C-alpha cells in the first residue's frame, strides 16, 4: 500500500507543470506507480532489478537499478529533482547526499521507522530506526523544515515513524 502521507504532501503542491520526482529506494513501486502522470516524471531507483521490471515500461517512469549503499557514486543528476520521496528506507552513511539532488525550491518528503517501532514489528535493528528528531537533525540545517511528526501510525498495523517535509531554499 502506498504512503498516504506522501500522497497528501504531493497533492498539497498542486502541481500544474511538469516536474521530476525521485522515488529513492522505490522497491515494488507502490508509491511511484500511482504518482506518475503527465505532470510527474518519476525516476525510480532501487537495487532490485526484478522489482523494477514490474514497472520499468510504464509511461512517465524511468528506472535505475543501483545499490544505494555501495561506495560508488550515485547515478543521479545533481540539482535535478523537484521532489524526492523516501519511504521506509534508511542508510545513514550517505543520507545527506540527498540534498545535492534537489533543485532550488525543491521538496524532500521523508517517512521511515523510528525508535520504538521494535515493540510493534520490523525493523527492530537500531541501524534502521531513526533516533529522536533525527530527520530534523540531518536535514534541518541545509533545508527548510516544513513539517515533522514522530509517533504512532496505523495503516495495516501500528508502527512508529518519523515523517518530515523540507524545502530547499534560501534561509
Image (cartoon, rainbow, N blue to C red):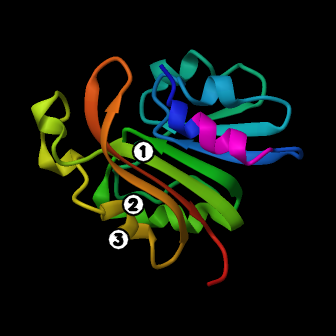
Task: Choose between 10 and 70: the one closer to the eye.
Answer: 10
For marks 2 and 3, the one nearer the N-term is 2
The disc, 1 or 3, on the residue closer to the chain's N-terminal end is 1
Residue identifier under label 1: 111
Q: Which mark is residue 33?
A: none
Q: Secondary structure at mark 1?
A: strand
Can residue 64 be seen in this snapshot?
A: no
Residue 91 position, x and y percent, is: 31, 52
At x 47%, y 65%, the residue is 97
User: Disc 2, disc 1: CB below 8 Å?
Assistant: no
The residue closer to the viewer here, 110 or 11, is 11
Badge 3 element: helix
Picture quadrant of residue 102: bottom right
Range of residues picked out in magenta: 7-14
Question: Residue 86 appears at what percent x and percent y?
Answer: 48, 45
Task: Name the residue carrying label 3.
Answer: 137
Mark with earlier residue (2, 1):
2
CB under 8 Å between callouts 2 and 3?
no
Amino acid at each position: 500500500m502506498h504512503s498516504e502521507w506522501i500522497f497528501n504532501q504531493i497533492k498539497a503542491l498542486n502541481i500544474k507543470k511538469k516536474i521530476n520526482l525521485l522515488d529513492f529506494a522505490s522497491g515494488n513501486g507502490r508509491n511511484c506507480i500511482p504518482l506518475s502522470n503527465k505532470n510527474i516524471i518519476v525516476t525510480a531507483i532501487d537495487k532490485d532489478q526484478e522489482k523494477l521490471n514490474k514497472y520499468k515500461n510504464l509511461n512517465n517512469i524511468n528506472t535505475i537499478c543501483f545499490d544505494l549503499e555501495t561506495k560508488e557514486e550515485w547515478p543521479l543528476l545533481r540539482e535535478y529533482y523537484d521532489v524526492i520521496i523516501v519511504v521506509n528506507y534508511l542508510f545513514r552513511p550517505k543520507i545527506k547526499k540527498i540534498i545535492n539532488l534537489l533543485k532550488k525550491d525543491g521538496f524532500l518528503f521523508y517517512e521511515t521507522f523510528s525508535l520504538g517501532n521494535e515493540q510493534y514489528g520490523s525493523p527492530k535493528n537500531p541501524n534502521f530506526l531513526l533516533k529522536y528528531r533525527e530527520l530534523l537533525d540531518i536535514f534541518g540545517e541545509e533545508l527548510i523544515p516544513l513539517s515533522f511528526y514522530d509517533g504512532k501510525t496505523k495503516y495495516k498495523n501500528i508502527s512508529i515513524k518519523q515523517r518530515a517535509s523540507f524545502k530547499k531554499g534560501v534561509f
